[in-house]
Amino acid sequence: MPDIDVVTLSRLQFALTALYHFLFVPLTLGLSLLLAIMESVYVMTGRRIWRDMTMFWGILFGINFAMGVATGITMEFQFGTNWSYYSHYVGDVFGAPLAIEGLMAFFLEATFIGLFFFGWDRLSKPGHLAVTWCVALGSNLSALWILIANAWMQHPVGSRFNPDTMRMEVTDFFEVLFNPVAQSKFVHTVSAGYVTGSIFVLAISAFYLLNGRHREIAKRSMTVAASFGLASALSVVVLGDESGYTATQNQKTKIAAMEAMWHTEPAPASFTLFGIPSLEERKTYFAIHIPYALGLLATRSIDTVIPGLFQLVDEAKAKIRTGLEGYTAVQTLRANPKDEAARKIIAERQDDLGYAMLLKRYVADPAKATDADIERAAWDTVPNVPVLFWSFRVMVGLGFFFIALFAVTFYVSAKRQLDQRRWLLYVALLSLPLPWIAAEVGWIVAEYGRQPWIIEGVLPTFLATSPIAAHDVWLSLSGFVVFYTSLLVVELYLMLKYIRLGPSESWEIPDVATRFAPPGGAAVDPSTLHADLPRE
Amino acid sequence: MSIPLDYEMLRVLWWALLGILLIGFAVFDGFDLGTAILLPFIGRTNLERRLMINSIGPVWEGNQVWFILGGGAAFAAWPPLYAASFSGFYIAMFLVLLALILRPVAFKFRGKVDNDTWRACWDVALFVGGFVPSLVFGVAFGNLLQGVPFHFDEDLRAIYTGGFFGLLNPFAILCGLVSVAMLAAHGATYICMKTEGALAARAKTAGIVLNLATIVLFVAAGLWVYASIKGYAVVGTVDHAGPSNPVRKTVEVVAGAWFANYRLLPWTLLAPVLGVLGALLAIVTLIRRMSIRAFWASALSIAGIIATPGLAMFPFILPSSTDPRSSLIVWDSSSSHMTLFIMLVATVIFLPIVLAYTAWVYRVLRGKVTAQTIGRNHQAY
């Protein structure tokens, strides 16, 4: 078994770099689409203020985008550097969506982002608009492929264990592609991004209105953000519910942990609005229940039972025992690759193989595990209940707050009273950090809630690391902390600087006739227009 | 689902595609890296440095995706390679990462505060962001040719037993220098093509010198391999369509094995010849002020130089110096038949599309970058 320090440090490093990367991603997703919407209005109406809006939010988008791209490279590398056994074990399935993401989406957004900034004077209006839409499309497609990969970690479909190569391999790529978890997660996540972009635009515009600056741009921006944000916030909550519904079917332990549901209740189960779950005593103190609510929401029926944690742990124990039969057969087959009986057992028991591997935390050879080891390993399948319980409630609470905020702003903006409602502007401004908090706790619910698995039911996280030295991970982890913190300081400084500067009146885009005019502004002979093109 | 291409064929195709992606990265992002390396040397004034930065400004982001795609393709098509090399070269990879993160940040942030010290700091960051990855990539190739100390345990967990400083042996450093010279030369031809006047003239001189250096270093590395680096060879036959289990074969270390392919298939000699001739052609065209042709000549040289070790080592991808049978070869370290096929379909569809819109973007951005063009754009770097 790998060094436990390496496991802890690698997990910490992955969590920190992922949470950090996820500071930039939602804003990229949301702002790219908002930019495309604003520029579409510009192209359709021809009114310059919409172009200035696009350019202004574009500057902030650019600062954010660079950080998103840069920190994204870390994510892709880390699977190989820190999680090499994971890469070996599931690269056949997990690698493909990542690579296709690069081909289909990342190339698109990264290639056109340059033209977005440098192409204003080189492209026609519709040409530039097409570029902006390509950036937005690329960002969103990118999220799609990443979430297809992630969904497979939550719900590993379309694959099987191959004992000859000792890894998971694809059996049906379309199942991986159309994983129901991927679909609900994708829409939930991109909508959360749209909410983030909308709150960002809303808060900064509110700041301008409170200061009486850039009123025209600010009011229009708020209107766009409120309407787009309202639709998105509704979609986040609806698709979040869909995510929960699919998780009820695939990740029962995660749902039970989120709800701190220790014991199975008769259907429909009650929803715990408040409570203090205790991991040690395996019970929840001071619980306030809403009767029937959870059962109705999570199963969409009145008679489907949601299993509690004690019951799920008992089921895990049974899976560990059947998984052990498969695990033993893998060892037999390794000694004699022609043993067809062992092959047959593996094929029958492969769904539970991962459960047997949980024992490796306590015994080197799982076949020698005692009942006490199995009991402990089975309880390991329960994620950290209090963290999930509270993260989930914070996320959902914020989701409903966003709906309310966008709805009120939308109403006030439709009545053209944005200027008069200063309290609303203050609320909007103070809401600026909230979508990030919601997104980060959402990540915690989804990924911390997947523990102890790196691939649900297939591979335990503690087995997936690289065989590297703990001091190397210390070095990279502290390097990332120092480096990322200083970058964040610089990034925030620049963001604030450009927010304070605001949109400028001096953004002139020379049209094609004056493109090559000398600085003095003398008329240009059209025949010399291309004089500065490369000679060959 | 029946798969219309056989496993052996797909493995060879993906071996070639991995090479093509690497070459794509070196040709496209290579000139960005090269320009960053040259920044402190040929950009004398702030304006000249801004011209250099803005000439790569609109395109480096897209170019960098070649690298990310290379990593993704290795992950998807050659999982054991990705797992063994990325974890083995842990510190080296970490340095590359920091350098690559520094780069976009430096681009964006350098021009945002009007202060000489601020700019000087980001200039250093840009140089580091260009130099470190260029060096490390070459060093990595140098280590591939010598074999890397790793083996697989019974669960097929790749265990690396070398340290970081072991990677920095003299031969690997020589390969690192080949890479730095090659990419800097490529950057010089690009700057020569995109700028005018004194800056372009300096880029031209730099391009000539660096292309010469590339030829000398490349030939020196080749002679070194010939004289004293042992190659690896598979003993007996390996099923080309067998399962990807890299410990079921026997491998021996043989002097001269890295030249076996060149002897067996003389057409493969085209690669090293192209590496040298391309650089020579770049020099000639630079002297005759044909900077666009020089750029493409240097791209050819890059393709030849990268293909040279790839062809020499075939079917080896990552030889193991401490446990040769753990070496990764084309026939036993790929993804499954189905995954290789799906990935090929995706590549055949999307790579041409990527190339088409990349070409369009370069066309829109054609022309020299001048003080006027960057003065006009308030979003220029």
Image (cartoon, rainbow, N blue to C red):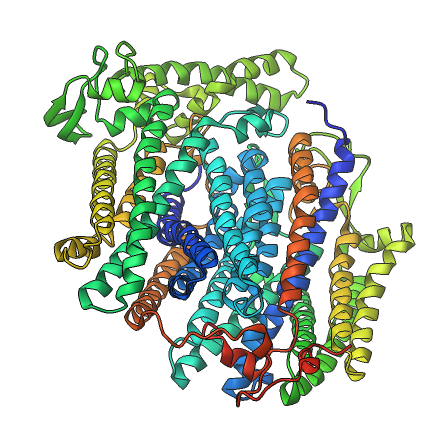
Question: For this view, does A369 lie left or right of residue A419?
Answer: right
Question: For this view, does A236 lie left or right of residue A85?
Answer: left
Residue B332 placement: quadrant: top right
Residue at (21, 10) in percent of width and height: A266
How far from the left and from the top, in percent, is residue A156? 48, 27
Residue at (34, 24) in percent of width and height: A245
Residue at (75, 42) in percent of width and height: B13
Looking at the image, is A141 positioned above or below residue A220? above
Front residue of this view, candidates A206 and B198: A206
Residue A99 visible somewhere in the drawing? yes
Looking at the image, is A244 positioned above or below residue A28? above
How far from the left and from the top, in percent, is residue B11? 73, 39
Residue B144 placement: quadrant: bottom right
Front residue of this view, candidates B211 and A472: B211
User: Which residue in the rendered view is the most extreme toward the left?
Assistant: A286
Question: For this view, does A237 lie left or right of residue B250?
Answer: left
Front residue of this view, candidates A171 and A278: A171
Looking at the image, is B84 positioned above or below residue A301? below
Residue A81 visible somewhere in the drawing? no
State which quarter of the image contains the N terminus of chain B. Answer: top right
How far from the left and from the top, in percent, is residue B61? 54, 61
Residue at (39, 48) in percent of width and height: A18
Front residue of this view, candidates B219 and A249: A249
How far from the left and from the top, in percent, is residue B286? 77, 80
